[in-house]
Image: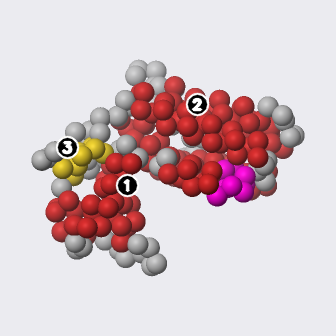
Amino acid sequence: MKPVVRSPLRDQIRQTLLDGLIGGRWGPGDRIVERQVAAEAGVSQAPVREALRELAALRLIEFSPNKGARVRELTQADLREVYVVRAGLEETAVRLRRPPVAALRGHLERLHEAAGGTLADQVRHAVAFHREIVRAAGNEVLLSVWESLGIEVWTHLSIRLLRTHALENAADHEPLVAAFERDDPRAAVMLRDHVLAYAEARHENG
């Protein structure tokens, strides 16, 4: 594993575990063995245990007596709970302060460019778009709570495990940018509904 400058070891392990969940190394019900992860990363079990606890707080894994950590079985209800909270936070952010349109247009351009790329690129740029909105509110508590939801990993897992639509493309975000540009009083509600749609949409054959 490549060292990350000035990044706590726990954070590096946490990212390794998240990459494994997103990439499919571990699926629902699979056990994540602390000793094995620690050996692969060349570290003690302590930072692995800390990282697992953080993922448990995100409700991505669960601990069972005498069985250790296992990947949770995720449901549509789990997904909706996360997105209901996320939608409320983003709506609040807009009501506190409107985001800079120029910055959002920059993210939108990158979303257009990512359209022909990988799903990971699309998700990353879409999350960056929404992070810009929350950060612009200027409320560190709000931003911290939003970040704590683990939005990028939840998006990946919902697509892979629940077969939800990605809904992470430029076309879905164009109306939001236009609303902010014209200072539409309905922008906050539009954003809330946009986020809630992530938890509802499914593939046609799902």
Query: How far is disc 1 from disc 3 in space, using C-alphas?
Result: 16 Å
How packed mark 3 is, by other alpha carbons closer than 10 Å (few <14, some 14-19, many 20 or more), is few
Figure check: 176 above or below 38: above
Q: Position of residue 35 (x, y in %)?
A: 16, 63
> Given this view, does label 2 or label 3 mark the residue nearer the observer?
3
Three-letter amino acid code at disc 1?
A: Glu
Q: Does the magenta-highlighted stretch encompass residue 199? A: no
Q: Residue at x 37, y 76 (%)?
A: 3
Q: Determine the secondary structure under disc 2.
A: helix
CB atoms of marks 1 and 3 within 8 Å? no
Any part of residue 133 in sight: yes
Three-letter amino acid code at disc 2?
A: Leu
Q: Which mark is residue 181?
A: none
Q: Residue at x 48, y 32 (%)?
A: 81
> Given this view, does label 2 or label 1 mark the residue nearer the observer?
1
Q: Which residue is mark 3?
A: 64
Q: Which residue is mark 1?
A: 54
